[in-house]
Image (spheres, rainbow, N blue to C red):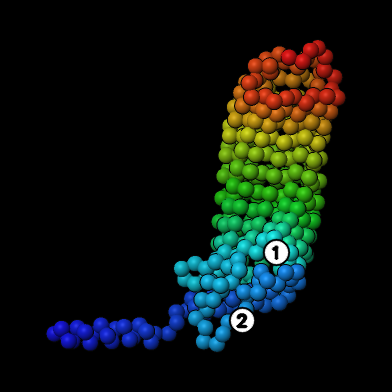
Amino acid sequence: MPSSNVLFFSLAILIITLSPIPKFSSASLMEANALLQWKASLKIQNNSFLSSWIPLPMNSSASLPCTSWFGVVCNADGSIHKLNISSLGLKGTLHQFSFSLLHNLTHFDLYENNFFGPIPPEIQLLSKLVYLDLSSNKFSGVIPPEIVMLASLEFLDVSFNNLTGSIPQEIGRLASVYYLGLVYNLLQGELPPTMGNLTNLSYLYLHNNNLCGPIPPNLGNLKSLTCLGMMNNHFSGSIPSSLANLSNLQYMYLNENKLSGQIPTDIGDLKCLTNLQVSRNQLGGFIPSSLANVSNLQHMYLSENKFSGHIPSDLGNLKSLHGIEATRNQLSGFIP
């Protein structure tokens, strides 16, 4: 009996050894070849970074991209799921990037290169994507509406490009996003009402665009928000009192817009707020004394508006406050 057991296990090992390579290996090989084709379309300033991206030898197990290729990480099945080639000085487009073959990507990072042209609508094929950073490039055209199909996306940054058009109306479908960066583009139009559905959002950066219209009151639904950056746009109307519902907000940047009316007194409920910037607008009325309740406030910028009356004396009780910038208003009285 012992000899038969040995024979059985020997045969089992032999069968496993001679078994064909699993399907994921052939898929990985196709993914690697897709990256090689894309690399061939790029202008590479310093080839040393991607010199590891070489054609696979004959009868390869397709493990080379997973173990030796710069910026490439594979999952347990040998499929490429992370691609980080940021800050390499690469120049080219995404026209020859095979979104269909690289559909297992969860992380795609092209930060700080010289990619240009449109962001293809085929990006929706990266349905498992969690992290997408296309910032600091030269992408142009619109933000493809198809990008809202990336249901698993948590981080999206397309800042510092030449993107035009408006923010996709269905942006609110990205329910898992905690970071949304759109700064320093040429975006225009009003904020989509669906943006109030991004309840997982912690960081919203919209500054230095041509966005206009009112600040949607339903931004007050974003209870996880810690940073609201909307400066240097053309937003108009009043500051909605619903922003006082952002109990975790630390930074509110609304400066350099066309906002009017008064600062809502409810802003005093923002106990976590450390930085309030509303300078260079058309705000008026009194500076609300309720700001003295914002115990963590460190910086307050109110200059170049139409504020009148006195600076509330209670602001002098804010122990964390480093300073108030309130020049070029219609204020009177003494500085507390």
Q: Is residue 21 above or below residue 110?
A: below
Q: Quadrant of the N terminus?
A: bottom left
Give the mark, 2 or 1, whose residue is nearer the N terminus.
Answer: 2
How far apart marks 2 and 1 lie (CA) works out to 21 Å
Residue 183: image location, x then y, percent? 74, 48
Q: Does the image show residue 228?
A: yes
Residue 232: image location, x then y, percent? 80, 40
Residue bearing mark 2: 55
Depth check, front residue: 145 or 272: 272
Residue drawn at 77 percent across, 56 percent down? 161
Q: Does the image show residue 144?
A: no
Are the residues flagged by discs 2 and 1 in contact, CB closer than 8 Å? no
Tell me the crowding category of disc 1: few under 14, some 14 to 19, or many 20 or more residues within 10 angstroms, Cα based: some
Identity of the residue furthest to the top in this view = 333
Residue bearing mark 1: 88
Q: Secondary structure at mark 1?
A: loop
